[in-house]
Image (spheres, rainbow, N blue to C red):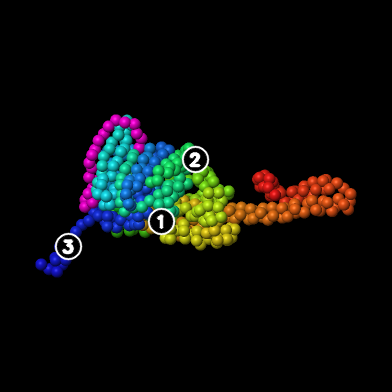
Amino acid sequence: MTKADTIFKEFREHSVAEFFKKNRQMLGYSGKIRSLTTIVHEYVTNGLDACEEAGILPDIYVRIEQLGNEHYRVTVQDNGPGIPKTHVGKVFAQMLAGTKFHRFIQQRGQQGIGASGCTMYSQITTGKPTKIVTSPQKGKIYECEVMFDVKRNRPLISGEVEYPGDMQGTKIIAEFKDVTFNWSDYGPAEYLRRTAVANPHAKITFVAPDKQRFVYERAVHVLPKKPKPSKPHPKGITVDDLLDYAHHAKARTIKSFLTQTFDRMSSAKADEIEKLTSIDFKRKPDSVTWRDAEEIVDAIKKTKFLAPNTSNLYPMGEKQIEKAILNVLEPEFHAVRTRSPSVYRGGVPFIVEVGIAYGGKAGKGNGDSAKTEVMRFANRAPLLFDAGGDVITKVVNEIDWKRYGMRKLDDVPATIIVNVTSTYIPYTSAGKQAIADIDEIHKEVALALMEVGRSVGSYIRREARKGEKQAKRKTLLKYVPEVAGAVAKLTGDSKKELEVKLLDMINRKYAAGQMGDGPEEERDG
Ligand SMILES: Nc1ncnc2c1ncn2[C@@H]1O[C@H](COP(=O)(O)OP(=O)(O)O)[C@@H](O)[C@H]1O
Ligand SMILES: [Mg+2]
């Protein structure tokens, strides 16, 4: 036996499930608090995605019960379309399986490892299956327990029952050990509060381990527009992608494959590209070789295309952000901005939106000790972890907030909200908690924040001026009786009348009303 033979006796193949079992931190299972938040995140984003795709206003229920030390039961129920019996196993116990990965569609999930990651984590910490109750058809309920065959990346289903009943959507019940619940910024409660901020069209109910119940009522009664799959833009395509698309294409010729697969690829554009290559575009798409794909991608680089179609991107919109802010944060002042669509890496469209809420329940902590909090969202899903590596955090820290009247960002009762909407969010890792620092996104976030920053700045300055005026007015009012008395003595006029005139003068000059603000200021002083 050669040396190579001896060494290669150890050669094995592994499944993607085995990979993620070993590298569970990549899916967000690192740290006891983070793990619990990850579980809630995966189930809740799936529920929201499913409801929205089915055109249903989401009603999501989350309960966390403590069963022992670092041992919890999580129940998440949605009112979505349900999951067909044939697919329950794959959804919950097969990695890289789902309805989203292969489509360019704006949804929260995109990789097909969220739900199965939870099943895996439950299984490796408790040895127990995950229970699913779902109604894929009106009047019928399907129930089963799912475990993972990790070696084969396949589901093991048991306890299947079907019975008639009234239920809409899907309910998941799973137990986890090695997790902790707490009320920190990284815990499930804060995660759900932020989910409510970014999803005013959803009703979210949360029952905490201490039985406290939080209900975030729906503030908007219309669904966001239903996300539609879009086509990839040619400028974002790599040789490998092109080859992959070509080999799976149903089109009869390379030309029709190109026009059917890509955004902005007209028949004229395909002809233009053909001329730049040595390839006959009447050939079948599955005959495209790596060399051909390289030629086509090169030709695409030399060709001008219209910017990506952004009609399939649905940002929250300024009205919705505003309603959400008012609903959850009840601020004194707020400013919002939805930027126009932009494109990163030449082919992927995205939209940046920001909101700033100031005063009221905005910021971390209450009253004078309140500090600024930054809420990051990707397609409306809150990002709580890995803030350091995130483009949003970087931009927030780069901005000179002093220019906008916020001396030290940390000491201001403000909530800064940033939502990035895209058909493909460029996450820094499979844990999906940070958006990569890509130049185009960086710039859009900065522009949006500076725009709302200016509004907040003028509000803060206006309030400061108002404060100064009020102080002056109060001082002057103190002297009114004395001055009126002295003048009355000199001129013989009535002291009362003089007092009224003086008060009137002062009020006219210093009343808040003069500054174009609310009348409530008139009451004090
Ligand atoms: N609550 C649910 N209702 C309906 N379908 C669901 C639900 N949860 C998951 N799914 C389906 O299961 C698939 C896999 O979910 P998941 O593993 O979280 O991956 P992803 O969300 O990234 O696609 C989803 O693409 C979706 O088709
Ligand atoms: Mg998911």
**Type of amino acid under label 3:** Glu
Pointer 3 residue: 10
For the point 33% across and 55% down, the residue is: 29
Marked residue nearer the N-terminal end (2 or 1): 2
Coordinates of residue 93 in the picture (x, y in percent): 27, 47
Choose between 183 and 144: the one closer to the eye.
183
Residues at marks 3 and 2 touching, judged by CB atoms closer than 8 Å? no
Residue 513 in sight here? yes
Q: Residue furthest left?
A: 1
- What residue sits right under mark 2 in the picture? 219
Pointers 2 and 1 in contact (C-beta within 8 Å): no
- What percent of the width, then of the height, locates residue 271? 38, 51
Residue 160 colored magenta?
Answer: yes
Mark 2 and mark 1: span between their CA atoms?
A: 27 Å
Region of the chain picked out in magenta, as a range: 149-169
For badge 2, the amino acid type reads Ala
Query: Disc 3 or disc 1, which is closer to the eye?
Result: 1
Q: Is residue 357 above or below residue 140?
A: below
**SS for dot 2:** loop
Front label number (3 vs 2): 2
